[in-house]
Image: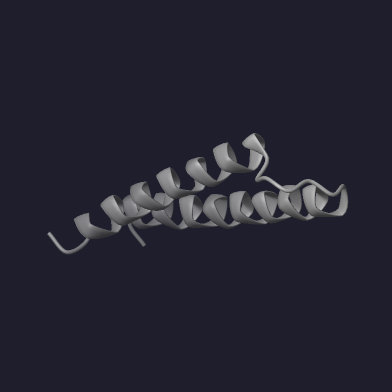
Amino acid sequence: MDQIEAIAEKLTSIAEELNDLAMHILSEAISEGQKARPDTEKRVSQARRSVEKAVHQLTSLSGD
């Protein structure tokens, strides 16, 4: 496994952790009776999407 693949793998793991965190935040909001998505969840989800984009960029380098 080269260095780029190793970093992409780590980032994939981080994206999964961010997803778990977002789901936890949503679950807490629902249990507290909130109707709207919490701002914190929105930002965590945005961070997850950014990390996923980075993974895509890195994995596309493998094909070069």
**Residue located farthest toward the front when viewing the structure as drawn:** 35
Quadrant of the rendering where the N terminus is positioned: bottom left
Above or below 36: residue 19 = below
Task: Return the x and y of residue 36 as percentages of the image width and height.
Answer: 68, 45
**Horizontal side, residue 16 vs residue 23: left or right:** left
Task: Return the x and y of residue 14 as percentages of the image width and height.
Answer: 56, 50
Above or below 31: residue 47 = above
**Residue located farthest toward the right when viewing the structure as drawn:** 32
Q: State the residue at coordinates (20%, 55%).
A: 61
Q: State the residue at coordinates (54%, 46%).
A: 45
**Horizontal side, residue 42 vs residue 52: left or right:** right
Residue sitting nearer the eye, 43 or 57? 43
Quadrant of the rendering where the C terminus is positioned: bottom left
Residue sitting nearer the eye, 23 or 30? 30
Residue sitting nearer the eye, 64 or 37? 37
Task: Return the x and y of residue 4 as percentages of the image width and height.
Answer: 32, 51
